[in-house]
Amino acid sequence: MENDNAAKLAVLIDADNAQPSIIENLLAEVAKYGTAHVKRAYGDWTGTSLKGWKDQLLKQSIQPIQQFAYTTGKNATDAALVIDAMDLLYTDRFDGFCIVSSDSDFTRLAARIRESGLTVYGFGEHKTPKPFVAACDKFIYTENLTYTVRTPRPSGAMSHQTSQIAQAAVRKLGNAGLVDLLRSVVDAASDDDGWAHLGAVGNIVRKRQPDFDPRSYRFPKLMPLMEATGLFDVDKRDPGDGNPAVIYVRIHPDDEDPASPAPTSEQVGTPPST
């Protein structure tokens, strides 16, 4: 569904839990997965805390949904968003939902929508609790929407220093399972010769880890990230008839031990944090 721009999506925003400054980039990201037929932002618009949203609501044609804070310490906004989400779900008009919040209260909502066979895209900050992340088909960290990523050279080559920095970042973050994840997914998707179609690798990675995103490591796509690690061979195959190249990857037979110590920050710079 991610490549089907005809998918009908409902974008539901917890305005109490999201920043208006990211909305333009967020909606551009949503457009990768489908068309936003519904765009709603929930909050108490009578107060002053959400005044920064006004320009974005008008500019992006987002419908504000008023929800009064009836009691101090109770979040009525969450309940209103959940009720609307279920009403929209029962119309059978949508292919997926985009839930914009860093609040774990929407974990059950995401799971319930997926139980109905629809795709759930979550958007939130890195502080988002893991249960909500895992409940989504794909989770996009909003910090990644504003990152300036490295643009690879046309030939796909990169400088020795850039490669060192990338490898240091990947190996350091490999303690969280990144390297093991990439290696195991390539192995799972590979044929008898060890080659795996890059598209299949990307699909399996997202199913295993919904918040996986090359932009977290300052790379725009999966292939430049895998090339930068130095752990994989890349083969671009020409299918002929003017069709674009088909990319395959495999684990390099002579790759270094991913658990080997990374160069120090003084040597290669400080890798990005997640």
Image (cartoon, rainbow, N blue to C red):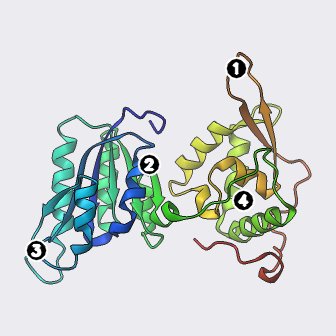
Based on the displayed image, in which of its 4 quarters is residue 66 positioned?
Answer: bottom left
On screen, 39 above or below 258? above
Based on the displayed image, in which of its 4 quarters is residue 238 positioned?
Answer: top right
Q: Label 2 amino acid?
A: Asp
Camera-nearest residue between 151 and 6: 151
User: Which quadrant holds the N terminus?
Assistant: top left
Between the C-alphas of marks 1 and 2, the distance is 34 Å
Between the C-alphas of marks 3 and 4, the distance is 48 Å
Q: Residue 179 carries which label?
A: 4
Based on the displayed image, in which of its 4 quarters is residue 250 positioned?
Answer: top right
Q: Label 4 amino acid?
A: Val
Query: Along the polypeptide, which appears first: circle 3 or circle 4?
Result: 3
Q: Residue 213, position in %: x, y?
A: 57, 56
Q: Is residue 103 visible?
A: no
Contact (Cβ within 8 Å) of mark 1 with mark 2: no
Regarding mark 3 in the picture, which secondary structure is present there?
Answer: loop
Contact (Cβ within 8 Å) of mark 3 with mark 1: no
